[in-house]
Image (tube, helix red, strand yellow):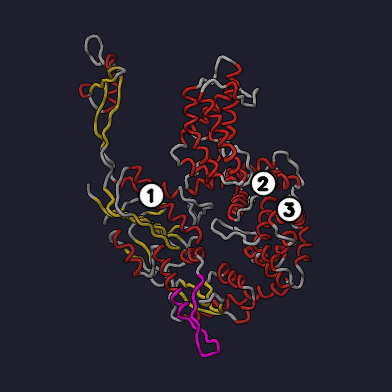
Amino acid sequence: MAVHDFLFELGVEEMPPKALEPLSIALFEGIAQGLQDAGVAGGIARRFATPRRLAVLIQNLTDRQPDRTLERRGPPLNNARDARGAPTQAASAFARSCGVDVAQLESLQTDKGAWLVYRGTERGAPTVSLLPGIISQALAALPIPKRMRWGANTVEFVRPVHWAVLLYGAEVIDAQILGLPTGRITYGHRFHAPKPISLDMPAVYEAALKRAKVIADPRARRELIKRRVRRLAADLADDNGSGTSARYKAVINEELLSEVTALVEWPVPIAAQFEERFLALPREVVISTVQHHQRYFPVQTEQGVLTRHFITVSNIKSRDPEQVRKGNERVVRPRLSDAAFFWEQDRRLTLAQHAAQLERVTFQTRLGSYAHKTQRVKVLAELLGAALKAGEAAGAAAQLCKADLMTAMVNEFPDLQGTMGRYYALAEGLPEEVAIALEEQYRPRFAADRLPASKAGQALALADRIDTLTGIFAIDQKPTGTKDPFALRRAALGILRILLDAKLDIDLAQLLASAAANQPVQREAAAGESYVFLIERLRGMYADRGDGISSEMLDAVLASETRSPVDIDSRLTALRDFLRLPDAPNLAAANKRIGNILKKTGADSQTQVDPSLFTESAEHELHAMLGQVRPQVESFIARRRYRDALSSLTSLRASVDAFFDRVMVMDENAGRRNNRLALLTELRVLFSGVADLARLPG
């Protein structure tokens, strides 16, 4: 087969920056999957994306599908010809459907009989005939939440489409893509190179666009931006009054970097600065203004001190960059001025006065206002604070935990909730541990975020999430499918991460019951369902970790009725290590056998073992070994040395094996039978002290 390079490019008006990367990946994967399903092989595949284009280039794409060997089974051989040997109507009809004469059909012998069969070869379709359909299917499947129409067109896309390039080798594949005829014409930078560019073949695509001031590869563009921004920041110097200059570095947020990458085709970093007076604002306020609102990169010293410098990334190489710099400085000034005004105004009221306004803000219609939530959180935080020895800080912080939601600063910068609570608390002279807890209540905000470090912060973070969780379950609005409006899955993971990381040994079921009892809506199943929800998240955490802890192992530990995630984790780690021992599989299998015997017999009439009823040496031996091992195991379990407890059980293996080899448990004599069942019951209780081994597979 011949091979040629393939290029598809869709030219559009500027796309939403946060949508560009997902759209680019989805288009690339959709086309690759379509080609794979069609059996068309190719070489290196690359994706390109800028604000004005989505493109896919595949090297050495074969020019057609491979031929397929066909085998179609027809009617049974004994129905293929009549008594005179002439083809029957069924045989003739089957031959016509295959496009051959009856004489060209073959026979197929199977263990179920003989059949007429057609064997042939289906010629693979040309790749150029398949590509338009594959591309259209990939475009239709793109994750576009809201499509738009333009002009008199009936087609829809994320933004109006202006051109489509579809090349296979040096040839254009004639097709209609989103209402436009395909061709070989693309366009460079809107201002630097607006004239049409004719592409001779796919291989010249990236270089041709680069000459036209477009960096088409998003990964290359991202790295270029990062490198240039860092270099520009490092070159900045600020006279500190002593005749020396400080070196600076850019604060590069990865999410912002991705967004800026999706906003420009020809990145040109430009350094600017704001007025020195704005550095009196909290650092996070300045960064949020510069970074999140204006998409600029803040600049700090090597020691982490924020400076008045920032770097913007322009999409054009201006002949007068000074004007670009001044324009960006004019834009950021009123934003920072607003922030300075909010900072001054908010501090005129204490946090307690801000908190008094929470009565008029609804948390959830049936669960009351944020003031009601605050009181519920305070009860839980004080309960947890006492368990964690957090002192009075947990309750004091809980009383003010949502106060900063009523400030002008948080209203303008919602991402600063908690952070501004800390600053306002310190500004009015509240204890530092209270201020820190106000900020830490929101940690972790995302999967890799830091966890609260202070005891009061841990108590408040747990109390807030647990109140939300049990409250939403109380009104029976638990998450379903992809809908999770109160982010309960994230809250559950936060609860578990805090408990496990800080090793907070707390009875989670009891805590949930206390929280559910405090809700304005009482639903009997709320606490239990909340606990199951958390355990399922815990199950998912272990599955994601991939450290050898299985779902069955978790079930085995949960059967021991421990309700502390920290204790559950300790038992699971010990169980995992125990199962790696040579004797573990035999003991687990024996425990399962014991469980099955006891379940079938329902043996609970005799709870005490009577050694005088033993008739076999194996019974005496097992009973004696149990007497030796039980105190050790129980002592280890009491001290939560679960690994030692399980390891001690391995000394029972020989006695257990001998018992099952030599002793008939279901003896005809009722006394001996019940005595042996009682012995097995003692053994199973001992085996289940750390985890119910009978629940393990195998």
Q: Which residue is mark 2?
A: 507
Asked if residue 36 shows in the view, the reply is: yes
Position of 59 relative to 679 (above/below): below
- Verify whether residue 248 appears in magenta: yes
The local crowd at label 2, few if under 14, some if 14 to 19, many if 20 or more residues have their Cα within 10 Å, is some
Residue 6 at x, y = what percent?
31, 54
Residue drawn at (60%, 22%) of the image? 612
Residue drawn at (75%, 66%) of the image? 351
Viewer-closest of 115 and 573: 573
Mark 3: which amino acid? Leu
Marks 2 and 3: CB-CB under 8 Å?
A: no
Query: Dividing the picture into quarters, in which one does residue 277 lie?
Result: bottom right
Taking the image as shown, residue 472 lies to the left or right of residue 110, namely: right
Q: Outermost residue, top direction?
A: 83
Position of 322 relative to 605 (above/below): below
Position of 90 relative to 70 (above/below): above
Q: CA distance from mark 2 to mark 1?
A: 51 Å
Asked if residue 362 shows in the view, the reply is: no
Q: Tag 2, which secondary structure?
A: loop
Q: Which residue is mark 3?
A: 383
Residue 222 at x, y = what percent?
43, 66
Residue drawn at (47%, 80%) of the image? 321
Image: magenta residue range: 230-251
Q: Closer to the N terminus: mark 2 or mark 1?
A: 1
Viewer-closest of 624 and 33: 624
Taking the image as shown, residue 155 lies to the left or right of residue 483, namely: left
Q: CA distance from mark 3 to mark 1?
A: 56 Å
